[in-house]
Amino acid sequence: MGMNSRKDFSIKNAIRIVFILAMLLSIGGIGYLIFSGWLSSAEKTAGSIVETIGEGIYNRVVSFMREPDHINDANRKIIENGILDLYDEESRDKFFVGVLSSQQEEIYSFSYGTENGEYYGARRNEKGVIEIMRNDVSTGGNSWYYSVNEELTAGERVVVAGKFDPRTRAWYKAAQEAAGPAFSPIYKHFVMSDLTISAAWPIYDSDGNLRGVMGTHVLLSSVGAFLRDTVNDYDGYAILFEKDTGALIANSTGVDNFSVLSDGTLKRNTISEMEDRDIQQEYAQYATSGDSIFIYGSGGEKLFVNVREIQMPGIDWILISAIPEGLYMSSVVESVYLTALLVAFALAVSLIAYHIVIGRLIRPIDDLLDVSAALSSGDLSRRAEVVRNDEIGSISESLNRVADKMQFLINNLEESVEERTEQLYGANVALEENKNQLQLILDSTAEGIYGIDMDGRCTFCNISSVRMLGYSSPAELLGKNMHLQIHHSYRDGRPFPIDECRIFMSIRQGKGFEADDEVFWRADGTCFDVEYHSYPQIRNGEVVGGVITFMDITDRKKREAEIEYLSCHDVLTGLHNRSCFENSRDKIDIPDNLPLSVVFADINGLKMTNDVFGHTAGDELIKKSAEILRQSCRKGDVIARVGGDEFVILLPKTDMGDAEKILSQIKTGFSNARIEAIKCSVSLGIDTKTNSYQSLEETMANAENMMYRDKTINRKSANRDIIDTIIETLHSKYPREKQHSLAVSRLCGEFGIALNLSKPEINVLKRAGYLHDIGKIVLKESLLSKDHLKAFTEEEREKVKQHSVVGYRILNLFDETLDLAEYAYSHHERWDGKGYPRGLEGEQIPLIARIISIAETYDRVLNRGDGPFEERKRAALKAIKDSAGKQFDPELAGLFVQTMDKSA
């Protein structure tokens, strides 16, 4: 008994010691984990928040800066592909106003500058109101701004600004140098007190030449507002500045990003000038360590700092955001006190539990051992006594339940079998429900899906496959050989051998196959283009069939054919384009096609047609020229449009003599063709490759050189024909204009003699007087029939005023009339500066233009009405006298009246 007592005593003491140690270690560990968890959580929360804030600001700034680039990318194709006619003022104004009005107010301007110095677009003025911008030859190189009317086109002119050339602007140069999208340097808005930046995108023609640059111009003040709204709730700050210069872009601290000096120049403030030196130290720490998230401490409170770099074409910025550590560490101090209380409470509860558990732990163990021995020997009638409701009691109850279960299973085996049968039935029901669910999923797909066994018979199919194949129900396909049913023939009706069928290959070779160049056959005997994927069905490592998914791609094939046609043909003329021509040259350059002749053709006057009559007329000229070439050539000849106004013709099996006959037909066709007031003409060159040793490139170069020679030799006559055709068309349609031109030319000549001008000057004066109204060729008869500007509506008056601009464009295109262009442009300017199109005044107006202005007015008044000639002459001279010093040069007006008084 004594030995047993000592053993019991030792076991109990050991249990007590182990229990106490475990209790103390557990409570200490729990306390440590709680405290360290709170401390780590606070630090992680602060770090996570500063990272989230930094990432949020970064994403917002990047998104804000990408928006203008997206605007350019979304709209550049409209100009690049010629969808927008820049010289159609109504369409142009609606385009720029429509784009700008759909953007946020930070986008203050959307514009396009050309390589010719023209500038068009829309802007928001200092009140946020959208205005239309124009700067071209009609504005004399000045920027004019117009209000926007209800039709989104130009209303009244509200601002007349000074000279402006977009090609000198930083945003234009940035895109030009980058040869792609780029951002300009930051600059100050010319009216608002705000920093701005411009996103620019260059636009090229089909030959890779720069046509102009599209620009979207953005205010940066909203970035600073966003920084303040984001960090103020955290008592932190955020700074955005340029990496290279340190110049501020935006900040949440209230520091000015820039200042305007007394001489009006812009001074960008930098981070080195900020009073808060911590910001500079934070950036220095980032530059040294490279860590984007870190804790910064400088004597006082520590800061959680996040630094990010923003890099885009033309942009290299730094974003710093910081929040104070104290915002989160105060909760850690409170957690220390709470942890101590929890540990003390846990210790008290553990001591009480210790006394209860130790007293009741040992007694029931021997009884459990006896019962388990009896059960293992086969005595299923023994049960353990449950003396308490704890773990030992639970073990006793569990042992008793095991004994009860064993005895129950032995006594109720038949009932167990019946229960298992019911379970199997439920599993089969669930399996059938899953099968139905799978069929529902299959029927919900747009693709056709069917399965086949190893013999190719259909085992299942979905509704989409039934519908695409033209059947009414799956029953019409189940069990059928699908190759014989839907895949039996090629498109042309030839049998499709089953050995070549990729669907059968997939189940025989055990791998997937796909195709998009075959057809499936419908129930009604028609076929359709199909794209299918066939995969083997594998069960227990063996192929048991296949699953095929397919789609009707008829529409896609049609689109691909259309794209292929467009990729090889010129959209405007339907002829081969340059790319197709280059690809087909080798097919034609073969010995069987010798002799092979090459014709180069270049349309004359296309630029003038575009400038004067618009690109629609220019397109008609190109189409008319293509039609003449097509009619003059034979079947088998290759005609290609290889440039804006250039064509190449390859004539297989054609010697020089036959080729010259074709050239003669082409010239005849052009001699009788006109577009608007333009007589169609073309410059032609020809050469023939007679043997295989000659290079086709050399033959083409010779033909092109001959074409340029023809253009050079006949340039003057072609230009003269164009001018003569325009003036002839104008005079034949409006005889009064012919009489007016002749009269003004005669009056100018007489007045030039009276002014003692030299013969060359008088000759120029007479020619300018004859051609001064050539720009009226673009005006409608209804406008020319009216006798005076006051009889026009405001819209009609603006159209009539354009004739001097059009005349300038026409005469400026030809060497023979280049010296007359300025006089046609200026003959409606007034001495008092109230004329058009440029508002010149006094002697700013060329002398010859001032003379034409007097002669033109005299002739108009002289031929107005049906009164006696002397009465009309007095009225005409009176009109000149009354307008002297206002409309006319007073000295010239007086001399003109004296000259006319002396004439009969």
Image: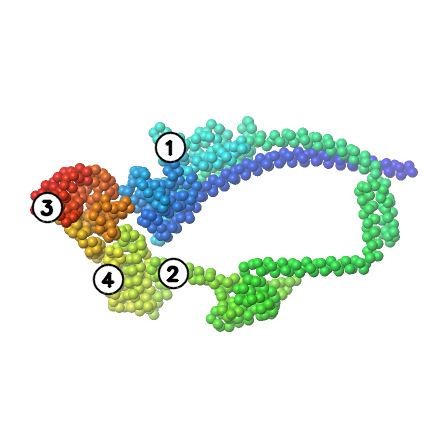
Q: Which residue is mark 4?
A: 672
User: What residue is pinned by disc 2?
Assistant: 568
Name which of mark 4 and mark 1 comes first in the sequence.
Answer: 1
Q: What is the secondary structure assignment of the residue under circle 3?
A: helix
Mark 3 lies on residue: 870
Q: Where on the picture, by quarter, is residue 160?
A: top left
**Front: mark 1 or 3:** 3
Secondary structure category for the residue under label 2: helix
Q: Residues within 10 Å of mark 4 (few under 14, many from 20)?
A: few
Label 3, label 4: how many angstroms apart (C-alpha)? 46 Å
Task: Tell me what residue is drawn at x 55 percent, y 31 percent.
Answer: 324
Q: Name the outermost residue toward the front.
A: 867
Distance from disc 1 to disc 3, alpha carbons, whole Å, reads: 68 Å
Taking the image as shown, residue 612 lies to the left or right of residue 65, namely left
- What amino acid type is highlighted by mark number 2? Cys
Q: For residue 266, which numbered disc appears in the image? A: 1
Residue 667, above or below 848: below
Q: What kind of residue is marked 4? A: Asn
Q: Nearer the viewer, mark 3 or mark 4?
A: 3
Give the mark nearer the N terminus: 3 vs 4.
4
Q: Residue at x 49, y 34 (%)?
A: 228
Frontmost of labels 2 and 4 is: 4
Residue 281 location in percent, x, y?
Answer: 50, 31
Quarter of the picture containing the N terminus is top right
Which amino acid, by three-letter code, is at mark 1?
Leu
